Amino acid sequence: MTIDGLIILDHTGRPIIQSNFASSPAYPLLHIDAVNDALAKSPAGAVDPVLYVSGPSGPSACCHVACNGLRFLCPVSGEVDPLFVFAFIQTFVDILRDYFGDLSAASIRENFDIVYQLLEEVIDDGYPLTTELNALRDIVLPPTFLKKVISVAGITGLSKATGHPFSSPIPWRKAGLRYNNNEIKFDVIEDLDAIVNKNGSVVTSTVWGKVQARSHLSGVPDLLMTFTNPQVLTDCSFHPCVRLQRWTRDKSLSFVPPDGAFVLMEYRYTPPNAALTASSQANIPLPIALKSSVTLTEGGGTLDLTLTSRMGIAMQSATVELFLGSGAQSANFMVSGGGSWNFDPKTLILRWTISPVPSSSSHTLRGSFTSSETVPRIGSALKATYEIQPHSYSGLKVDQLKVSGEQYKTYKGVRLRAGGSIEFRW
């Protein structure tokens, strides 16, 4: 499974940077045109993530992902699992964010030399190579440190990286790390994906979770993390630092952590009584309810939406979106119970935002819109997204975290965050 290359487009669809392609120069242009044509034909931006591209050398596919106004393209011409390509794109995006902080067209243009160096390291002959951030920082210097070296030394050109980039016996951790304050913090983040039909019944619902960590520990500490209810976790995947045998034996995480931010594990939440019911989806209660009344008339329509919180705590925010059709021209709405709305004439999406959402509260959006179409063809579902903190669908709790191998005092912290995306069909 190989990747032909990587292309980064700005918000106008113009290429900023692309890797070297072994094929003809026209090959990447075909994929850029294919993505731009697909986006131009879809006003709402709903384009298939994998596009078929025909060319003189044969058919190929283009996997693309939008991120922060940019679009990352990976052309592939062989038998490649799309998930393999998307995993590589996400990994490269995470690397760029770690290097530049703000991922944008401007930051990439300002550091195009570093991006090219990273491309040379992370992919070799179509295969992902060095993707560990700690190893990459020894090979390709981050821009802030690079500028500091150049300004202090008063030289031109690029500074050389360290002479021993792979000196550490642990690939994901640098050697000789020292901190005045030793700390490690964890974020347990869970996201609910659900579909609700027009009768209000849950068609499907799944909770995906991950444990993110940020480590600043000196030396080479060995950590052991245990949970109070690990039996609710299924389909787990782990960072390479986790010892799989220990997890298989007693559901404990034993690992030597990387330095900085990393994802320790990812999982899917399975309700304890899922095996006793015909459908496990009904066992995951939805934190919000959305009732809708949509009436389409000639040249427009009216909407009456009511969002109700089912939570016993306040939610940080909730957003409801609806595509008003390719002919939508204007909108006029009123909200009650707090919140605001806006209509984007470019994407033709009506967006209703409530922040914060008090516990057990109800909010209403009523109004109308006009359209150049005789019978408007609006979206068949409303998309609701929200954020809750602190909250956990699975009730996953960290029982204890032991640090061995070092003698210093360690500051530890765990934070719970939950979010979701629910499609309400009307």
Image: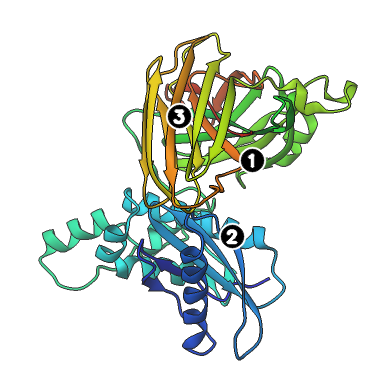
Type of amino acid under label 2: Pro
The mark nearer the N terminus, 1 or 2, is: 2
Quarter of the image where the N terminus is located: bottom right
* Residue in the foreground of this view, choosing between 308 and 170: 308
Q: Name the residue under label 2.
A: 49
Q: Which residue is drawn at 54% across and 54% down?
A: 46
**Occupied quadrant, residue 113:** bottom left
Identify the mark at residue 371; answer none if there is no mark: none
User: In this orientation, does residue 417 appear?
Assistant: no
Compared with 165, 417 (above or below) is above
Q: Mark 1 points at which residue?
A: 242
Element type at mark 1: loop
Position in image of residue 61 (x %, y %): 62, 73
Position in image of residue 4 (x %, y %): 57, 76
Q: In this view, does 121 lie to the left or right of 391?
A: left
Q: Name the residue under label 3.
A: 184
